[in-house]
Image: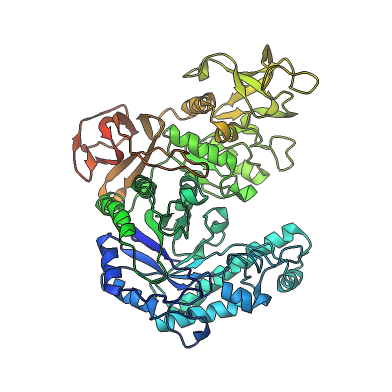
Amino acid sequence: MGQTELRFRQVHLDFHTSEAIAGIGDRFDPEQFADTLAKARVDSITCFGRCHHGWIYYETEQFKERMHPHMTRNLLKEQIEACHARDIRVPIYLTVQWDQYSSERHPEWLAMDDSGKQMGTSPYEAGFYRRLAVNSGYYDFLKAHVADLFEQLPVDGLFFDIVQPLDDSSYFSRQQMLAKGMNPSLVADRQKFGLEAINTFKTDMSAFIRTLDNDCTIFYNAGHIGPRQRLVANAYSHFELESLPSGGWGYVHFPMAVRYARGLGLDCMGMTGKFHTSWGDFHSFKNPEALQFECFQMLAHGAKCSVGDQLPPHGEICQTTYNLIGSVYSEVEKKEPWCVGAVPLVDIALMTTEEFTGERIPTPAGGAVRLLQEAGHQFDIVDTTSDLSGYKVVILPDEVPVSSTFATKLNAYVADGGSVIASYKSGLNDAGDAFELDILGVDFKGDAPYCPDFLVPNDVLAEGVPQTEHVMYLKGLEVSARDGSEVLAETVVPYFNRTWEHFCSHRHTPSAGEVGYPGIVKNGSCVYFMHPVFSQYAKNSPRWVKQLVVNALALLLPEPVLRLDAPSTTLATVNAQPHENRWVVHLLHYIPERRGQEFDVIEDVIPIFEVGVSIHIHEEVKNVATAPNGEALSFEQANGRVSFILPKLEGHEMVVLDF
């Protein structure tokens, strides 16, 4: 599918509205609706064609029984017409796997778990979360519904929601698996079939839509973009990265998802919400400082912005909500010229373990994202099929198995001048009993005999780390260093492991001062950590663990794109704008805090001062200035680097390097 250039300031307007509520849309004023959006600087808004309750919000003869029984007007049509009059795009939302109307009236379309129960909400439980299978007769309805939509309305785009692979044991799925020679009683076969079925749905539906319209945008939402989407990226026109930090995603999810998604060749849009918690949180408001950070972070990562809202049943748009959104989007609008066509400048490829585990936020990769961001490093997230040639360092965090094919790829990458950092089980073969990746310079012996044990770094890794024992809480692997490898840190063992037979103090046994086995090993341009350092950082963030990884990176990456002299709470990215012949450095300083028990919040913007920045660049820089206000900054260019100091960073600042 061709490249789509998204607009920068979108709203995703939910409208999941019960049939038990009357007067749907009776207070909707199309002029007030569109004027409010325009005043809030919104240039695209996703409005509802059909919701999770299963109700349709436009007039249709073909599916009249599915129109909301209390809808007082042709709501969606009026929304579109009013927005189009102000040059606001209106992609249309259609639910897929959650549809209460269809679930109740067509139980033969429902997916079934391996115990024979319908997936999701029980009949006597609040919620519309029963799963419909798109490889059932439901698909025929979906196609007819889409065709009807194009007949009734102008369609700028389609947003299909809840489109995920299912581990389905329904009769029709079992029959289709058998026809493919698969065994429905095996979980692996059901999961493989579920992925094939959902990908077939996306491919077929997109092809069908293109018979109706060549230009509308198409997106299938599963709450995350990751390696699964690579397989069927040609069914999408773009990616929208649903990531509400307070709604179950957290503040690690978006940078993880966008750093992967932006490498798939399609324009990306981040999606947060105006809600204090998550979707359907009526009459709640996100702290303005949090919404600033979430939107400005999208820009910093080269993505466009989307903010989720929900229209009340009566259809009157909330002015307070759009005062909030407008306060941020007016700033986004000013920043856009320095974000158009942005290309991230990165040194490091971080290999995601999602490819192997299916986890949305795998612990090793999540820990690595936090660690690298805090250290100011510039990186993408990749999988084993990604092109590695443009990266200086590849990181394999903790649990990346290496097949012979992937080993060949990594060997060639290193032979061409690349470097690798691997930790714990990364580099082992699929069986987990030997290192497939010989370039690490270590041999596998087994699980480490002690836990915790202690690392003592040598002077090569001494920066910021005293040369004494440092506890490593998680069990590692015992390895031996091959001839020619250099041990950068030895492991010192405790007197004994803590058991009921012998224990010491409250937590773990102290060091006995005896060297046990290699802890960190360097072989040429590769460094191996025997501990799961990235999972450890995700769990409880020992500073010495971060510093050891940073020091190892300094050995392999002596000239990173960016060096930052600022608190570790600072987020920094570097983007190129080739058509403008300039680079843009994004600096953000917002601090999420766990003030309640459930999620992090951002309430205060705390300025920092005298932020030192050094950029590795060979082109001659003409001037350095902040954007959009154009304040010139003094700078020095020498030895392949440009250095400058930003006097004050309050929230988000862009610094432009013009060539």
The colouring scheme, among rainbow, by chain, secondary structure or one colour, is rainbow
Number of dots carrying numbers: 0
- Residue 231 location, x and y as percent? 57, 59
Residue drawn where x is 62% and y is 67% of the image? 130
Q: Quadrant of residue 9?
A: bottom left
* In the displayed structure image, the side of residue 527 where residue 73 appears, left or right: left
**573 or 311, which lies in front?**
311
Residue drawn where x is 43% and y is 83% of the image? 59
Q: Residue furthest bottom?
A: 61
Residue drawn where x is 29% and y is 56% of the image? 323
Q: Please say if 480 is above or below 247.
A: above
Observer able to see residue 594: yes
* In the displayed structure image, the side of residue 3 where residue 181 appears, left or right: right
- Residue 167 location, x and y as percent? 68, 62
**626 or 99, which lies in front?**
99
In which quadrant will I find the C terminus?
top left
* In the displayed structure image, the side of residue 358 where residue 263 appears, left or right: left
**247 or 333, which lies in front?**
247
**169 or 523, which lies in front?**
169
- Residue 87 location, x and y as percent? 27, 69
Residue drawn where x is 51% and y is 55% of the image? 225
- Residue 478 location, x and y as percent? 71, 26
Observer able to see residue 154: no
Q: Residue furthest top?
A: 513
